[in-house]
Image (tube, rainbow, N blue to C red):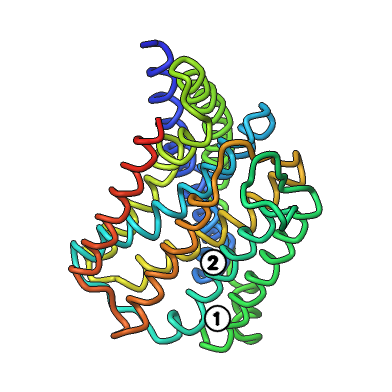
């Protein structure tokens, strides 16, 4: 048992450290190649914070533990919207831009609702047992991700955040910095290796715990695995809120939620269809309700207050209590 616990701890440590090395190496490489900062943020950093969920879900699916993969994404999104937003708002009330309320949060709600619908292949059934997120469902999610990225870059261009044609030409003519090229490439390779090895150890240990104590894989995915892979978002958002950068904090959560559903589950389902055995409609509803509550709080005064943050945290604790009660 102790060896299993060590596997889980070492696995999550390698996953988090690997994601950090991968993101730092890729971002540094992009800067050295004169890639604009906003492009790095919209792509490399966003993907980097979701790398733990991606590798853990992929390894889970390939090992035949689909409930761990789906539970990881659902649990991470619930963790993000309730615990991370809640803790961030408790630390410092979060101001939310009108454009975020009117455009970004609705997109996250739409992605959550799309997943909810795809989980019900048989609409006459009130349970999810045996239903499948098929390869065609995965392709639908990936198309949604492409639309999201197109929308993100289009919005950035409209706000003047992307370089103009003249600025791009100037960037091409500037001498490129290859001084740390090999160092950055080494960081990227090392990060990928740590992600792969750490994910394998983490999933193997979590699965062993589930079998040993006869706990459903879905519950392990919704709790231990989701909490472990969401640590980067928690740290990023709480620190951002403390420094008064609430836009970064809420944007990190929303971007992570959309990445988790559309890219991670989409890619995982295309590689290996995900059969749902332990995820319940309550878990799916919790994912939908949590993002809906954040939208409601943000819509009222374009902010999430400390009291509202405390309510989100209490709601998360109640949900965790419900999962433990089912054991």
Going 75% across and 39% down the picture, which residue do you hit?
272
**Mark 2 or mark 1: whose residue is earlier in sequence:** 2
Going 77% across and 56% down the picture, which residue do you hit?
139
User: Residue beneath label 2, please?
Assistant: 42
Q: Is residue 240 above or below residue 77?
A: below
User: Residue beneath label 1, please?
Assistant: 156
Q: Is residue 304 above or below residue 136?
A: below
Q: Helix or strand or loop: what does disc 2 sit on?
A: helix
Relative to 56, 231 lies left or right: left
Q: Helix or strand or loop: what does disc 1 sit on?
A: helix
- Whether the residues at callouts 2 and 1 have beta carbons within 8 Å, the answer is yes
Look at the image and tell me in which quarter the C terminus lies: top left
Could you tell me residue 111's position as x and y percent?
59, 65
Could you tell me residue 305's position as x and y percent?
22, 73
Could you tell me residue 217's position as x and y percent?
53, 30
Quarter of the image for residue 13 reads: top left
* Residue 171 shows in this picture: yes
Q: Residues within 10 Å of mark 2 (few under 14, many from 20)?
A: some
Look at the image and tell me in which quarter the N terminus lies: top left
Relative to 48, 147 lies left or right: right
Find the residue positioned furthest to the right: 136
Could you tell me residue 162's position as x and y percent?
56, 80
């Amino acid at each position: 048992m102790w060896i299993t616990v060590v596997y889980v701890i070492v696995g999550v440590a390698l996953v988090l450290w690997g994601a950090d090395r991968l993101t730092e190496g890729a971002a540094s490489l992009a800067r050295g190649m004169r890639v604009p900062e906003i492009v790095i943020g919209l792509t490399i950093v966003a993907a980097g914070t979701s790398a733990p969920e991606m590798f853990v879900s992929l390894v889970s699916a390939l090992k035949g533990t689909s409930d761990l993969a789906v539970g990881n994404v659902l649990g991470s999104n619930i963790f993000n919207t309730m615990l991370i937003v809640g803790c961030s708002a408790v630390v410092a009330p979060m101001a939310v831009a009108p454009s975020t309320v009117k455009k970004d949060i609705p997109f996250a709600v739409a992605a959550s609702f799309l997943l909810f619908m795809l989980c019900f292949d048989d609409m006459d059934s009130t349970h999810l047992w045996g239903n499948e997120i098929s390869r065609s469902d995965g392709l639908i999610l990936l198309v949604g991700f492409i639309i999201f990225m197109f929308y993100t870059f289009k919005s950035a261009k409209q706000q003047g955040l992307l370089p103009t044609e003249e600025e791009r030409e100037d960037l091409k003519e500037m001498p490129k910095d290859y001084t740390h090229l090999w160092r950055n490439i080494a960081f990227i390779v090392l990060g990928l290796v740590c992600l792969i090895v750490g994910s394998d150890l983490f999933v193997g240990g979590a699965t062993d715990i589930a079998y040993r104590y006869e706990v459903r894989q879905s519950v392990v995915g919704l709790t231990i695995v989701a909490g472990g892979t969401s640590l980067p978002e928690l740290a990023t958002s709480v620190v951002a809120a403390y420094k008064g950068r609430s836009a970064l904090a809420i944007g990190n959560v929303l971007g992570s939620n959309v990445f988790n559903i559309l890219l991670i589950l989409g890619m995982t389902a295309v590689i290996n269809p995900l059969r749902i055995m332990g995820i319940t409609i309550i878990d799916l509803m919790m994912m939908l309700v949590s993002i809906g509550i954040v939208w409601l709080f943000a819509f009222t005064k374009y902010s999430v207050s400390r009291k509202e943050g405390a309510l989100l945290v209490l709601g998360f604790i109640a949900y965790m209590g419900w999962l433990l009660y089912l054991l």
